Image (tube, grey):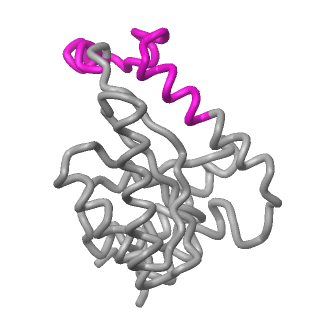
Amino acid sequence: KIEKNQLDKFIANISLLDRLADIILIDTGAGLSDNVMNFVMAADEVLLVTTPEPTSITDAYALIKMVSNRDKNKVIRVVINRADSMNEATDIINKLSLVADKFLSLKLNPLGYILQDEMVIKAVKLQQPFMINFPKSQASKSIRELSRKLMEDKEKKDDSENTGIRSFVNRLVNFLST
């Protein structure tokens, strides 16, 4: 359980981000803990990243199911990471979408994919961001494409009182205090 002073400090710090960024991504990591689900449900939309590995796809579906049980209108965008090919990524997104629609009556929103790239492994060994060290790598190109799509979608949406960091924080506080 989070103490009130920790929560106040968190809210104050995260609210500063509202002026610094158009889009804020919070990496909750894998798993379905209460904290992860609180962040997921408080988010304006969910960016679900999975890999082609069967266990990762199963975990992704479990998260989709948990979200579906709580809010059928939650926007879930899907990214396939470390795909061997565009066909593999598309196949996984299509299968996940089909299963979510058929069994959960939830429509997923494919965002794209990031191909397996040795430059990412090399950057990890160098302890440097691959986007900086290898800006022309396939993974860097994919990240830029995903970013472009996110920004285009954000520009198309109307800003409302129910979106943004302040709204997120209010929803998160409500989830944490229940």
Split into 4 quadrants, where in the image is the N terminus?
bottom left
Above/below status of 7 relative to 81: below
Where residue 100 sits, quadrant-wise, is bottom left
Give the magenta part as a residue range.
120-147
Q: Is residue 129 left or right of residue 122?
A: right
Residue 124 position, x and y percent, is: 24, 20
Task: Determine the residue positioned at 65% across, 65% down.
Answer: 166
Asked if residue 15 is among those painted magenta in the image, a careful observer would answer no
**Magenta region, mostly helix, strand or loop?**
helix
User: Would you identify the image quadrant in which residue 129 lies?
Assistant: top left
Q: Position of residue 44 (x, y in %)?
A: 60, 65
Position of residue 93 relative to residue 137, above or below, is below
Expressed as whole percent of the image width and height from the top left, the position of residue 81 reads: 35, 38
Give the total number of marks visible in the rendering: 0
Residue drawn at x 43%, y 53% as measured from the top left: 94
Picture coordinates of residue 64 (x, y %)?
Answer: 38, 69
Q: Is residue 137 magenta?
A: yes
Quadrant containing the C terminus is bottom left
Question: Would residue 34 be found to the left or right of residue 27 on screen?
Answer: left
